[in-house]
Amino acid sequence: MTRSKITIPQLQSWKHEHRKITMLTAYDYPVAKLLDEAGIDVILVGDSLGMVVLGQPNTTGVTMEQMLHHAKAVRRGVSSALLVGDMPFGSFHATPEEAIRNAARFVQEAGCEAVKLEWHPGVERIAEAIVRTGIPVMGHVGLTPQTASQTGGFIVQGRDEASAQRILDAALALERAGCFAMVLECIPEPLAQDITTRLSIPAIGIGAGRYCDGQVLVTYDLLGLFQAFTPKFVKRYADLSGTITEAVSRFKQDVEQGKFPGAAQVYHIKQTTEARKVTETKATLQANR
Ligand code: KIV
């Protein structure tokens, strides 16, 4: 059954209906298609691309060109989910004009329906400028990987009163700037619950506990494809690393033992009936030797 298109007003109404929003990351066509067909509401082309697909140590090396390249592939696999492009480090930091230009590239070149911006002080003005051009913006507060080196690394944020207040203020500032939803990453559950209640837009948590309006995970974490490290908040729903290693080992063994390709995987030349009979007879004689 085909799903209807997920819209931003729909997601926003779900907050008030207490219907949970599901969001996952995708970086290529086949996975995007599977997520969309499984009924995921929001698909994010995350800049986690850098770490889980490109093998980089963090997300700061990811470029606009890389994001657009992957977002275009994801677009081809998504028909119902809302497609969000993650603005990479450096693409929205210099001037509002440059941020608008880059946000527009996600829409015009890759077919995204919204962009996501990680919090840093002052980013609310950038978010507001992008929203004013008509491009929907999702905010991202708490652990913000693009500036993790400034905030103590990939660790839980908002554990003390002052930093909890800063995260709450950031979320409220981005909401005032016109963001349509907010990612809350890696913060204590009570803080996430408080922010979720205070925001009138949906709060989508990742490592932010049970009381957000929705949940997002990096798909490669959920599928057990990214092995470098697994944060505590990840639940693995599959072990694709194990499945792939096992399948590839069987392929290697089959090739080495002459079992692949087998009769089912080979092509035949066109033969007359007479020639086919001769070939079959030869094959039978050979098999009976
Ligand atoms: O880049 C990403 O995958 C993200 C999610 C963790 C929300 O920003």
Image (cartoon, helix red, strand yellow):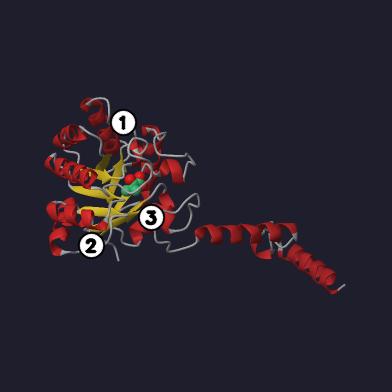
Q: Nearer the viewer, mark 1 or mark 3?
A: 1
Residue of label 1 = 91
Return the residue at label 3. 33
Left or right placement of residue 245 versus residue 176 in this view: right
Q: Do the residues labelled 3 and 2 touch (CB within 8 Å)?
A: no
What amino acid type should be assigned to the residue bearing mark 3?
Lys
Relative to 121, is 227 on the left or the right? right
Comes first in the chain, label 3 or label 2: 2
Alpha carbon separation for disc pair 1 and 3 = 27 Å
Looking at the image, is mark 1 or mark 3 earlier in the sequence? 3
Q: The disc labelled 1 sits on which kind of residue?
A: Ser
State the quadrant of the N terminus. bottom left
Residue at label 2?
20
Query: Would the CB of label 1 be found within 8 Å of ligand 1?
Result: no
Question: Tag 2's secondary structure?
Answer: loop
Q: Which of marks 1 and 2 is nearer the N terminus?
A: 2
Compared with residue 145, is residue 65 higher up or lower down, i.e. above or below? above
* Rendering quarter of residue 242: bottom right
- Dot 3, crowdedness within 10 Å: few (<14), some or many (≥20)? some
Amino acid type at mark 2: Lys
Residue drawn at x 28%, y 51% is 187
SS state under label 1: loop
Q: Which residue lies furthest to the right in this view?
A: 289
Most foreground residue, 6 or 156: 156
